Amino acid sequence: MKNNRRKFIKNLGILGTTGLMMPNIILGNTQENQNYMLEKSRPKVLFFDVNETLLDLTEMKTVVGEALNGREDLLSLWFTTMLQYSLVTTASGQYEHFGNIGAAALQMVAANNGITISEKEARQTILKSLRALPAHPEVKAALTSLKEAGYKLVSFTNSSNEGVKNQFEHAGLTKYFDDMLSVEEIGKFKPFSDTYAWAARKMEVKPEECMLVAAHGWDVAGALWAGWRAAFIGRPGQQEFPLAPKSEIVESDIKKVADILLIYK
């Protein structure tokens, strides 16, 4: 079995070229590091963030940009405002659906730039576009390979239960997941540590047996600080938080992450 895995590594040519990282170590193409990879234990559960990690936000950004009178320069401000107020909501002991927070953030950004958007228009813009996102091109093949290899796959999102159900039905992702978790049940958004601890309990595993796969530095930072393992997907415009622990795997898409996870024993 080990010889087969070594052959798999050689054929992929991934060591030394993937950007795979461990705390304080960048794995190179040496016999020692190949042996290390072959002995790396599998996480019991792979948790996948949804928006931007699995689903492509390009179309949503276009719709939001149109609502902001074509001001595409305001898209990043809108997204960070949405994240900021999800944290404010949780820190204040409150909960509101993520889509509604996105709509409120859209109104705020619009108002600060002399653009008028009604509450109804803002909600329709955000909720409709959130539910119509396609999967990134490599996602289905990657999930298929992981599922066939025996991994337990769980989605883990700040979106509501109904929201992610509709998203997955539209994107054709439902069949790939053993379970779908929404922070709606605990009423606390990621990256609060309680939220990751709740997800681990929900799946009846220890924190160190969990791995989060996500395209947001704040999300993998929260998971790592909660005692989880993490794989960071470096989608365009995304970076890890330099002050957080390093993710175990750093790659540009989910297929490349899956190729590495298939080597783990």
Image (cartoon, helix red, strand yellow):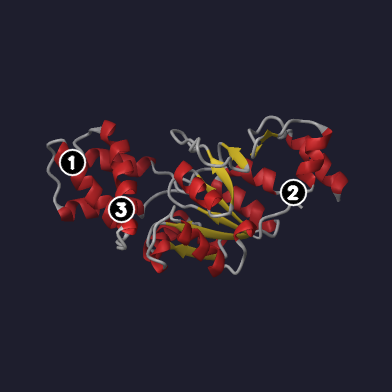
On the image, the x and y values in percent for residue 53 come to 48, 46
- Residue 216 visible in image: no
Q: Which mark is residue 170?
A: none
Q: Earlier in the sequence, mark 3 or mark 2?
A: 2
Vertical position of residue 73 compared to residue 223: above or below: above
Residue 127 located left or right of residue 234? left
Label 2 SS: loop
Q: Residue at 27% of width from left, 57% of height from top?
A: 100
Real-space Cα separation, disc 1 to disc 2, in angstroms: 49 Å
Label 1 SS: helix
The residue lying toward the viewer, choosing from 145 and 14, is: 14
Q: Earlier in the sequence, mark 1 or mark 3?
A: 3
> What residue type is disc 1 on?
Ala
Residue to which mark 1 is pinned: 110
On the image, the x and y values in percent for residue 183 come to 42, 62
Vertical position of residue 226 compared to residue 60: above or below: below
Residue to which mark 3 is pinned: 88
> What residue type is disc 2 on?
Lys
- Number of other residues with Cα within 10 Å of mark 2, as a class: few under 14, some 14 to 19, many 20 or more: few
Q: Are marks 3 and 2 in contact (CB under 8 Å)?
A: no
- Number of other residues with Cα within 10 Å of mark 1, as a class: few under 14, some 14 to 19, many 20 or more: many
Residue to which mark 2 is pinned: 40
Residue 256 located left or right of residue 185? right
Label 3 SS: helix
- Residue 256 visible in image: yes
Q: Residue at 23% of width from left, 54% of height from top?
A: 123
- Number of other residues with Cα within 10 Å of mark 3, as a class: few under 14, some 14 to 19, many 20 or more: some
